Amino acid sequence: MHDSDELDDILNEIRNRQNPHTEDAPPKPEPPQTVDMPLFDQADAPTPAPKDLPENPTLPTEAAEETPAAPAMPEATPTADGREDVYTNVFSGTEETRAEATYTPPTRPLGDDEYPEEEMKKIILTGDRPTGKLHVGHYVGSLKRRVELQNSGEYDDIYIMIADAQALTDNADNPEKVRKNISEVALDYLSCGLDPEKSNLFVQSYVSELTELTFYYSNLVTVSRLKRNPTVKSEIQMRGFNASIPVGFFTYPISQAADITAFKATTVPVGEDQLPMLEQAREIVRSFNTTYDEVLVEPKALLPENEICSRLPGTDGKAKMSKSLGNCIYLSDEPEDIRKKIMSMYTDPDHIRIEDPGKLEGNTVFTYLDAFCKPEYFPEFLPDYQNLDELKAHYTRGGLGDVKVKKFLNKVLQAELAPIRARRKEWEQRIPDVLDILREGSKVAEAKAAETLNDVKASMRINYFDSDQSDM
Ligand code: TRP
């Protein structure tokens, strides 16, 4: 997740963008139009009915369940007189010769169990740059969801990456900062409930295959395409790079495509600011699969469920939560720090006396309550009100003071963050174990990435010493 004031601009650009492949796209071959087509060899697949085509045919859909199962090719049933080339069509009941046999391939999307092993897998990859401790914005915007996805049992493999190599693309002069934050981010992950038994936690720079993939993919991306990436554009502005943009930073969307595709990830849970990266990754996959043999999997972004969670403002009400602005509540903050930050939170500047009517819009305290409050907190901490709607109504009507609402938010946040902080404290005593988890996770990640790199090289026919050398 990025600190970004320009989120609106970014989103507008994404929404307005008509066609990712314009004048300067690689000239040939054209990527297929059917961007959401199944990720399997189309020659082997029945034609799906265009209207019923699900967003991602590897996932079961209601449409797929409603459509009756496709009949199998009729078995040859020798007829009474023993003629073997004639058999009864089990659908029509009539006798047919093999040549006459009528068989219409199913026109529904494929069911879950009809995909080859590899295609059926649901794989998550996501990650964070280790440039600081994670804060409550990261928590509601992504960490909480990751833990839910992890515990849903719906995913075959989950890879969570600490993107140190990416962090170096704009911190080349400060590797110490990146180094220090590897364990901080890992501690944040573990304390939020990411479980190394279920999610593979790893460090990007330990998987050197990612760098190699990036190099090959970079041949499929143009400079002007990279320049159009709205997130990169706004980051360049924010960092004041202007004319002195490091090449590594400029091309990090390509390396991010490598991160995703190396694990054949189908699902990438990210914030909205990462959508341009996903789009770029999908373009690279399509370009690769049409230029060479089809080996890469097109990923899909999974956005936070509600908008408040995808962009929680800073405690000062500014959209940008950043260390330098001092407006973040960190997952590792002590209770007293949290309380102080909440008591000084930005509310409605026109809500001066208790009896004044208050505004909810832009009122950070209520935004945080929207993000964190659960119904059960009312009987526990504020029994005068049934729910958040009642509290909001009283506030807008007038007669409810900011301090009362802030005290409630403090109790809510303390309740939410206490178990996270407690788990963090435990893990902080076990740093060598944390590093072991990352080391082991990186080995697993490397093995998977190496497999993909092999596929990629074979597909590009640059595996000269492998098998078929007859044309060398
Ligand atoms: N760019 C992401 C961030 O800054 C981190 C990241 C690197 C990532 N590679 C990724 C996220 C691949 C998702 C998928 O938070």
Image: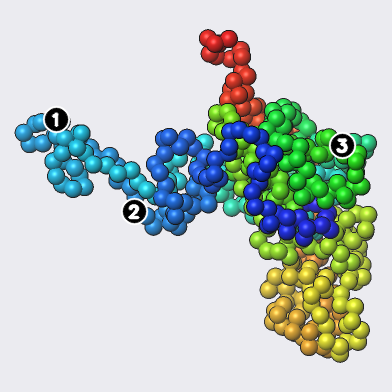
Q: Which mark is residue 68?
A: 2
Measure the C-alpha gap from mark 1 to mark 2.
Answer: 30 Å
Q: Earlier in the sequence, mark 3 or mark 2?
A: 2
Secondary structure, mark 2, is: loop
Whether the residue under disc 1 has CB within 8 Å of ligand 1: no
Along the horizontal axis of the image, is 272 left or right of 103? right
The nearer-to-camera label among 1 and 3 is 3
Front residue (pair 414, 260): 260
Most foreground residue, 403 or 432:
403
Which residue is tagged 3?
A: 246
* Mark number displayed over residue 234: none
Q: Looking at the picture, which amino acid does disc 1 mark?
A: Glu
The quadrant where ligand 1 appears is top right
Q: What secondary structure is marked by label 3?
A: loop
- Secondary structure, mark 1, is loop
Tell me residue 115's x, y (percent): 45, 40
Q: Which residue is mark 1?
A: 84
- The residue located at (65%, 43%) in the rendering is 21
Q: Give the percent coordinates (x, y) of residue 321.
A: 85, 58
Q: Position of residue 127 (x, y in %)?
A: 73, 44
Whether label 3 touches label 2, CB < 8 Å: no
Amino acid type for the residue under numbered disc 3? Pro
